Amino acid sequence: MTTRRPALGVLMVILSGALFAVNGTVSKLVLRAGIESPQLTLIRATGAFAGLLLVSLLVRPGPRRLRVTPRQLPLLIAYGLTGFFLTPMLYFSAISRLPVGIALLFEYMAPLLVALWARFGQRQRVRPRLWVGLALSLAGLGCVAEVWGELKLDGLGVLAGCGAAAFLTLYYLFGARGVAQRDTLSLTTWAFGAAAVAGMLTRLATAGTGGWAPLGGSSDGIPVALLCGYVVVLGSIVPFLLVAAAQRHLPATSVGIVGMVEPVFASAIAWAVLGSGEALNAAQLAGGALVLVGVMLAETARIADPVDHGVVVGTKADAQDIAVGTHP
């Protein structure tokens, strides 16, 4: 039996959040170089699948953990498409049009959607704080978008961020069922595999658009190929494994709450590296804080029933254990 070490778990989640946060800025640099969102999604999914497949084969029980029954296949495909293909592709589209921190705040509405599904879709009991959390998050998003002004945010970017939140919600729900059937490492490996196949099919369907020449170039003086390597290794594989390991030491809800450091780190890193275009004004910073407080209230609003309905309210790392998680 593993000895629980909460401090170590918190450290792992903070480190994973930092890596995910840096990944937002790195991804934006790749997109600026001319790589398109579907291409970056394909690079990430294919590289992560290869890396996690190797880990799965080396870690006990080895190849046996990768066995898939016909009944599990539809769920693995749905989980991979929603969480590892559509969510990141829309997120990449959002950050190409919006500051990284704002794009993440829109995506962070997913835990609220999960909580609302638990309440209305599955009629689970929730604490009244859910409604306070919902109100705070909506008010916060209003501040982020500065609804009292000229709505300066890019409309397509906002739609992409909201779409990422919607698919992230499905990712949580499918993940809750997936971890009931298999371990998180094999689940994540096959999910990235499904995303890689979807990315290749999308690439074939759009042949002739988005060439690969930018991979040989640089962005802000950094080779694009090196940036893509970060996206795959330190922006995907390592933080996912850290989150999975952290859940040996912390409850899923705690992992989700600590994981909220990601948008805070992401905004600061993007501003430092990408310049003033990523800066948030006072109203947007206050709005971001309201969103995070609202999400935290939603995280802790669900009342566990004697019979679990297969939904866990959490952030993106939650799909790892729900899976819990920061960014998929």
Image (cartoon, grey):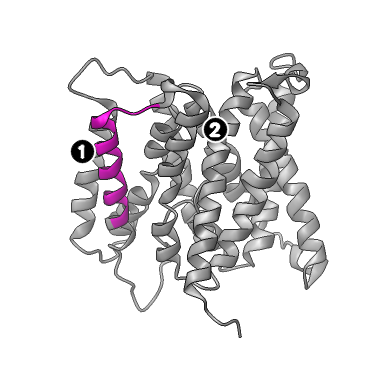
Q: Position of residue 5 (x, y in %)?
A: 52, 76
Q: Is residue 321 above or below residue 172?
A: below
Residue in the picture at 69% in, 61% down: 186
Give left or right: position of 305 versus 246.
Answer: left
Q: For residue 139, which numbered disc appears in the image?
A: 1
Tell me the amino acid under the disc marked 1. Ala
- Image label count: 2
How many angstroms separate mark 2 from mark 1 (CA)?
26 Å
**Residue 70 percent across, percent down from the top left:** 71, 59
Q: Amino acid at mark 2?
A: Thr
Q: Compared to 327, does 269 lie above or below?
A: above
- State the residue lying farthest toward the bottom: 1
Looking at the picture, how far across and down is residue 199, in whole percent? 68, 33
Task: Report the span colored magenta.
Answer: 279-296
Q: Judge whether 136 appears above or below 207 on screen.
A: below
In the image, residue 168 lies in the stretch drawn in magenta: no
Measuring 40% from the left and 64% from the top, which residue is drawn there? 253
| Residue 143 position by quadrant | top left
Which residue is disc 2 drawn over? 25
Where does the N terminus fall, quadrant-wise?
bottom right
Residue at screen point 38% across, 32% down:
102
Label 1: which secondary element: helix
